Amino acid sequence: MTNLSHPTLPGALPDKRQVAASFSRAAASYDSVAALQRAVGMSLLEHLPDPLMPSRWLDLGSGTGHFSRVLAERFASASGVAVDIAEGMLRHARGEQGGAQYHVAGDAERLPLRDASVDLVFSSLAVQWCGQFASVLAEARRVLRPGGLLAFSSLCVGTLDELRASWQAVDGRVHVNRFRRFEDYQRLCAASGFELLGLERQPHVLHYPDVRSLTHELKALGAHNLNPGRPAGLTGRARMQGFLQAYEAFRQPQGLPATYQVVYGVLRKPQA
Ligand SMILES: C[S@@+](CC[C@H](N)C(=O)[O-])C[C@H]1O[C@@H](n2cnc3c(N)ncnc32)[C@H](O)[C@@H]1O
């Protein structure tokens, strides 16, 4: 697999093998630091129309399988498939009680599933790692049965801007993962052939006592900077000091903020 570049992203996304390796390494630490991911996934579940009775669901980018277990409880008579690009995450998920019946290694842009084989595609905070969101939409549409739903959450431009701006004050290097614009999600969803039931953006702001707590958490999640163009090796003491000082300018009474701009989308595959 090669680096991905996409006209709607300002530059290239990380190589998918690096994404898979990084998340595999993070499988053991992920759950302990995934407060935002929990909150976003729960909020995505609340976006699902009620009643909903899928006979087969897909948890796409399932990670440690937390939401596969929630889906299995919620849709007790259905069977579930978990797909993730990181083998380490799938291994971790398989080791837990409950959740999906099947754990399959695969890429959201080329799903290893048959046409019209699921009724619900649930994907929380995974597709921001995909360079071609149009391919994710096309694949979700292919594997869904007519009338089936795609519910996704993702991140868009504005995410981790405090971190980005603080590095910007020090050097011009790529220190923070890149994100698609919300307008691109709107455009790509509108062109997808899905019926759009809802698409919105909501800021979630987390607070940290210091910058190291934030960067350690990103690493424990496997979501630290993997972009091509990121600086290699150690950051010099003076640049690091400048960076920490720049981030301090954002400090609020609750601590140092890290803003996530979360996109929530719910789409239905037309019946015809
Ligand atoms: C931030 S975690 C979210 C995990 C889980 N959905 C949750 O909310 O806890 C992102 C997951 O997406 C997976 N992922 C990244 N790119 C992917 C791709 N192209 N296809 C499938 N999974 C992918 C990663 O390996 C990782 O497990």
Image: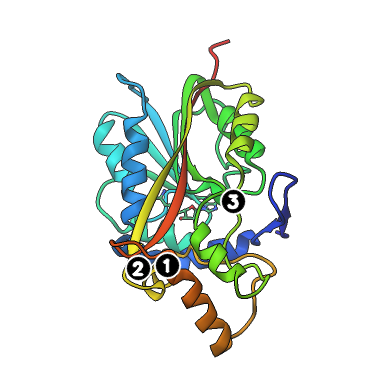
Q: On the rendered image, what quadrant is the C terminus found in? A: top right
Which residue position is annotated with label 1?
26
Q: Nearer the viewer, mark 1 or mark 3?
A: 3
Q: Nearer the viewer, residue 129 or 7?
A: 7
Q: Which percent across, then down, holds residue 134?
A: 66, 36
Instruction: Look at label 1 and name its amino acid.
Output: Ala
Which residue position is annotated with label 2?
29
Look at the numbered discs 3 and 2 and tell me whether their residues touch, using CB distance below 8 Å.
Answer: no
Determine if the C-beta at disc 3 is less than 8 A from ligand 1: no
Q: Which percent across, then down, holds residue 21?
A: 54, 67
Which residue position is annotated with label 3?
179
* Element carrying mark 3: loop
Query: Vertical placement of 263 versus 15: above or below?
Result: above
* Element carrying mark 2: helix
| Image position of 119 (left or right of 254) | right
Q: Nearer the viewer, residue 161 or 248?
A: 248
**Residue most extreme to the top:** 272
- Quote the CA–CA distance across marks 1 and 3: 21 Å
Residue visible at 61% across and 75% down? 170
Q: Pointer 3: residues within 10 angstroms few (<14), some, or many (20+)? A: many
Q: Which percent across, then down, holds residue 146?
A: 52, 17
* Element carrying mark 1: helix
Instruction: Look at label 2 and name its amino acid.
Output: Ser
* Residue 100 in sight from this viewpoint: no
Q: Pointer 1: residues within 10 angstroms few (<14), some, or many (20+)? A: many
Of labels 1 and 3, earlier in sequence is 1
Number of callouts: 3
| Image position of 1 (left or right of 31) | right
Determine if the C-beta at disc 1 is less than 8 A from ligand 1: no
Q: Pointer 2: residues within 10 angstroms few (<14), some, or many (20+)? A: some
Look at the numbered discs 1 and 3 and tell me whether their residues touch, using CB distance below 8 Å.
Answer: no
